[in-house]
Amino acid sequence: MKLRLFSLALLLCGGLTFSQDYFPENEGIKSKNNNYRAFTNARIYVSANEIIENGTLLIKNGKIVQVGASVSIPKNTVIEDVKGLSIYPSFIEVVSGFGVDKPKRAPRDGRSAQYGPDREGFYWNDHIRPENNAVEKFKYDQKKAETLRKVGFGLVNAHIEDGIARGSGVLIALNDEGNEGERVIDTESAQYFSFSKSIASKQSYPTSLMGATALMRQLHHDLRWYEAGNAVTTDRSLEALIANKNQAQLFLAGDNGNVIRADKIGDQFGVNYTILGGGDEYERIDAIKKTNATLVVPINFPKAYDVSDPYAASYVNLAEMRHWNLAPSNPKVLEDNSVNFALTTHELSSPSDFASMLQKALSRGLSKEKALEALTTVPAKILGKSDQIGSLKSGAMANFLLTSGDIFDQNTTIFENWVQGVKHTLANKDLVDIRGTYNLRVNGTSYNLNIKGKASKPNIEIKKDSIKIPSKITYTNDWFNMSFSTDGDTKTYVLNGLAQSGSENLNGKVIYPDGRETTFIATKSSGPEDMKGEKATQETTHSLMTVTYPNIGYGNTAKPKPQNWLFKNATVWTGIEKLENTDVLVKNGKISKVGKDLKANGATEVDATGKHLTAGVIDEHSHIGGLSINEAGQNSSAEVRMTDVLDPKDINLYRNLGGGVTTFQLLHGSANPIGGQSAIIKLKWGEDAEGLQFPDMPKFIKFALGENVKQSNWSSYARFPQTRMGVEQVFVNYFQRAKEYDTKKKSGQPYRVDEDLEALAEILNGERFISCHSYVQSEINMLMKVADQFGITVNTFTHILEGYKVADKMAEHGAGGSTFSDWWAYKYEVKDAIPYNAKIMADQGVVVAINSDDREMSRRLNQEAGKTIKYGGMSEIEAWKTVTLNPAKLLHIDHRVGSIKEGMDADLVLWSDYPMSIYAKAEKTIIEGAVYFDLEKDKAQRAAIQKERATLIQMMLNEKASGGKTQKPKMRSKRDFHCETI
């Protein structure tokens, strides 16, 4: 706090160039420079949309006094004629850790996780640290400041890059000659958030993206409760949030999915976040545009992969190759879609790479006007300081760049970067520009000499006729030294001399290979302006790949659309019976008619003779399509939602379509007794997260029993429960708390919104259903008794490998069973599993489904259903129900899916053979009348993918051959998700 007050004092006394000094002068006689400085005859970019030709910029005491084509210049003015040069506003960086060290990682104590906070008097979660102020940890770094100034930046907004709520940033002027009081423009410039935990805390929660999302929601609820005066204690974190609410709110999301997640949180609580993206917004531009958020966009475009080794190349997937190809187009796509954005150096290995990356974006079509806005006026507006920074209008801070020309031309030199009216020289603007093409004559032989690059650091190319000759140049203070070799480096000529201002030619001394000296002359034929855009033209020759939905292999070039269908002469499995030689008519995404001799009426007719048509397969228990599966930081995580972490790009969605799956329940894992809220998904491959969700989705939640939740599988000794009886008490305690919470809520009294208890109260009110991970009969009985105690029903016991022991009690309670056909022996508590489990439960009146809990098994559930015929003799109709109608009943969606009858959703699979046969292939998988998998199209896509990979590999090989930087492919270990993955 003392440091913060000291910094504030420096700011108040500082701005020494702007306000009256009050420090005593005890170091001799001093005087303050009150002269004006005028830059005349310049091309001045007041902003991206206001350009003054032959203008004058007048500054004094670090501020712009006047700018225009006609400026009245006071007598006490230092006038600098910069004819032929350009003046731009200095760039502004809004997301940086400049001058602020990250906290040190907190040491771990043993193997157990820490479930509580370390701090008192602050928010209950240590990853929420809004009370942090970057100014208290700030230390000016001259070396990094110089690197930033060289690429055009004059202001940096720095923050502590740690935590979910990160505290306030500090706005810094990159002025080496000033002191901290002068450099610090704003000590509380913006408030920062992210989805990443603090490394300074050992607190376990959150352990996942969905946990971080839920924590942000709960933080906002708690802030509202606290701000209304309902708390009895002082919370320094919430006090800081209240104090910071009028600051710019920046959310460091990091990819297009997280941009949408952050925006949803902001929309829910009325916070207008400016959001840091990931450079992949082009993939989901429609959804990004709908957020209406201002973005901060990195241009850390990936390097080409080194694919010269075919084995290493096999580890680079098509999505990564495409991103390398398409990422430089991201700013252009944002501009074309009218998305407001700033540009940032964030995640660049060095800010010195910024200029080259920006050139790539410009070569892909980003306009120079938009680029300038994204570096000046937009960041100024984000920070709420448009009247002070980001433009060269009167009264603004004197932060500007003096350049040799168009700042976005690769050959332009930034001569000076003025910050707060203080000059920082980057290159000598009086240096003679020797760039151009020349006719060089040495020893009676003519050569073509091309001097290019930047005026301050040129490079050369010498040719004899069309043959390139090895050469190099150094150029300092108008003195040049060139050398070139002939006859395989055996003869070297050295040319040196002094470039003369106003002279079109170069002349000087030449030293021959034999040591003789004489003079030479190089006659200029064209100037440097003729070389502009060379690199940009080369960049645009790259072919750009097509963005697909989703943008990975097997994505669709256009989203599937519903069609009307007439399937003729199929064997139709309605869910109740099997009908031979039957027709099914599909209209407007629904099943219109089932019968014989139906007419097409404009529908696409499919001859299904000898084939089988069924309802789409439904998996009651899946973990594919989720970016995270477990939130293990608390014994109840009822507040987390699988809908928050849907992954539309998971290739397993497509693979499951190939196995006839059209719907599944995405469940939380089994890390804790009370898990998270489920998502019921239709596998609409190509839709975004919203489009995947089942219409009017019933509410479910995952509970769990057994070894996982009592933590016997990962030796944690800090979190309750540690025993099976402790698991029971967790349920009783939380249901009792939820009951009391719900009673208070319904009473009309003020109450603190608790998202954990909200979900549990929905169970008590019959609005949310339990799907419980279970194995051992004693625990299955226990949970049914707890449910009876609170007047609720366990909807589904999933896994339930000892269900055959308690099937009668399950039927009496009203619970369903979703089990494996023959999956067991993977841990001790499944030792009593038998393959007749499903049949025995069904015979007792339990609604039985066969589930997968595995990304591979899920696409073979048709075969898993067939095993129930072998083990117990289920009829083929009842067996098929275990993967269609029965899971639909368990998920309360059987009014829409799971069977074939009039009015149902047209979620259908056309099988090549008997559907429970190992020889059966899904030829078409249809959801609501649209084809999401077609076997013939799949074959064509495989060939197209190989062709596209070959094209991109060749591009990368060409990139490497031309001297471009490359990166090594990342060797990956493959991972599967199921309940035992903790």
Image: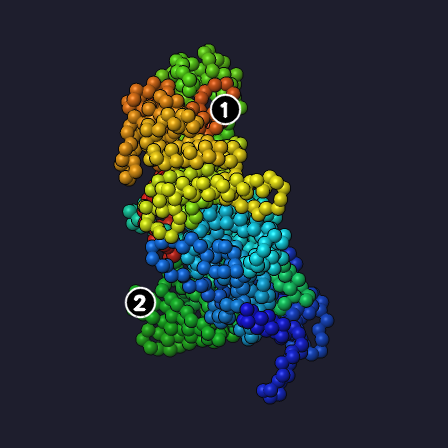
On the image, the x and y values in percent for residue 531 come to 50, 59
Q: Note whether residue 531 is visible.
A: no
Amino acid type, label 2 = Asp
Dot 1: few (<14), some (14–19), or many (≥20) neighbours within 10 Å?
few
On the image, the x and y values in percent for residue 848 come to 38, 26
Q: Residue at x 30, y 65 (%)?
A: 488
- Give the Cα separation between the discs numbered 2 and 1: 83 Å
Point out the residue furthest to the top here: 597
Dot 2: few (<14), some (14–19), or many (≥20) neighbours within 10 Å?
few
Residue labelled with disc 1:
895
**Closer-to-camera residue (73/840):** 840
Residue labelled with disc 2:
489
Q: Earlier in the sequence, mark 2 or mark 1?
A: 2
Q: Residue at x 54, y 42 (%)?
A: 740
User: Is label 1 in a helix, a strand or a loop?
Assistant: loop
Q: Is residue 495 above or below residue 936?
A: below
Q: Quadrant of the C terminus?
A: top left
On the image, the x and y values in percent for residue 34 come to 67, 78
Amino acid type, label 1 = His
Q: Residue at x 42, y 25 (%)?
A: 812
Q: Residue at x 45, y 72 (%)?
A: 475
Q: Is residue 171 left or right of residue 466?
A: right
**Closer-to-camera residue (740/599):** 740
User: Is label 2 in a helix, a strand or a loop?
Assistant: loop
